[in-house]
Image (tube, rainbow, N blue to C red):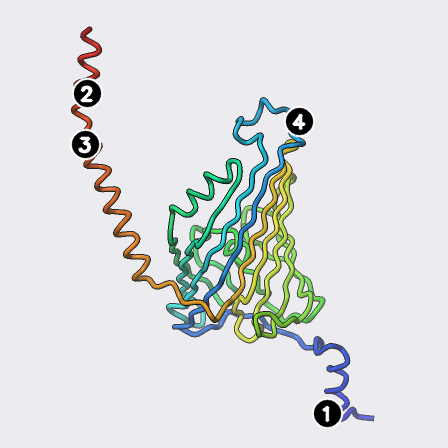
Amino acid sequence: MRPTPFLCALTILLAGCQSGSYTFRYSDPAGTTVNYKYVLAAKSDPSGVKDPKTWPKHLLAPSSMDVTGTMTVTVSEAGPKKITVKSWNKPLSATGQGFGKSDAAQYLAKGIEFQQYQVDPRRKFLRQDAVQDPLTNTLNGLFPEKPVSVGSTWEYKPFPQDVPAKAKLEKMEKVAGVETAKVVIDVPSGTSGKTKMTAWFDPKNGRLIKSEIVSVVDQDGMKFHSTFTQTMDESLEPISDAEYQAQEAEFSKKEEEERKKRAAEKPKTEEKAKTGAGR
């Protein structure tokens, strides 16, 4: 007997609505802007270090760093083979213990960071040197050529010089109000560490809704652990390029003031050196 539309719908419903196939493609139109909040938590544990003499002293105390911030991602141009993406990353808070305290201060001091890159609809970079951060790196070429369904696995090479990463469409899941495809990725990371990324995409347009990167490294007994989580948040105000440009102008002004100060002090320093040498 030929199944009726009602029975087909009921079968899909009882299966958890996860029997469909998806062709993942990044297809947000030009002008699309998405805002994210992110949290970074990192810590080190030196208790297992085998030979303390091989490590700088400041690394031999436990450390941690906790960062929060926002990110704005805009599609500035979109075509059938090339999507131009601009992103602004703004740290809001950063605290730390041990050497993580100075790392946190440096992170805050950088202020808003900007990057621009181009990808194809499979999220593959059109230029290798455009890859700039762990999150964006790992998405490089993630989307498979063929349709996939829940349970499907595939391989791709986010880092051309390394072995392939392994990806799996684990399930469909609602995140931040969007029905997403949850993709789990085992990232190649050498013999001393392990990195796992989970990315939640809107299957309709390939838009990233949430991501999480968990990294564990054991280097001669020194253990580093970090977790980075980024989630779309429609309540956030976008970071404006005007704010970024104002910051860069202020940075340039301070650098010029420091340069003039050093130039003014140079003759005095040289004179002191000559005087000391003549004694």
The amino acid type, in three-letter code, at marker 4 is Lys
Residue at mark 4: 50
Mark 2 belongs to which amino acid? Glu
Which mark sits nearer the N-terminus, 3 or 1?
Answer: 1
Task: Residue under label 3, please give it.
Answer: 263
The span from disc 1 to disc 2 (Cα, nearest Å) is 89 Å
Label 4, label 3: how far apart the Cα atoms are: 47 Å
Q: CA distance from mark 3 to mark 2?
A: 11 Å
The residue beneath circle 2 is: 270
Q: Which residue occupies 66% across, 32% down?
A: 47
- Closest to the observer: 194 or 131? 194
Q: How many marks?
A: 4
Residue 45 marker: none
> Does label 1 or label 2 sit earlier along the sequence?
1
Q: Earlier in the sequence, mark 4 or mark 2?
A: 4
Label 4 vs label 1, nearer the camera: 4
Q: CA distance from mark 4 to mark 2?
A: 47 Å
Q: Looking at the rendering, in which quadrant would you find the C terminus?
A: top left
Quadrant of residue 3 in the image?
Answer: bottom right
Q: Secondary structure at mark 2?
A: helix
Q: Establish if 5 lies above or below 211.
A: below
Dot 1 crowding, Cα within 10 Å, few <14, some 14–19, many 20+: few
What secondary structure is found at the residue carrying circle 3?
helix
Q: Which residue is tagged 1? A: 5
User: At label 3, which amino acid type do we have?
Assistant: Ala
Residue 98 place in picture, x, y as percent: 53, 36
At label 1, which amino acid type do we have? Answer: Pro
Percent from the top left, x then y, of residue 104? 46, 44
| Residue 240 image-quadrant placement | bottom left
Residue at figure coordinates x 66%, y 71% from the top left? 172
In depth, the one of 218 and 158 nearer the eye is 218
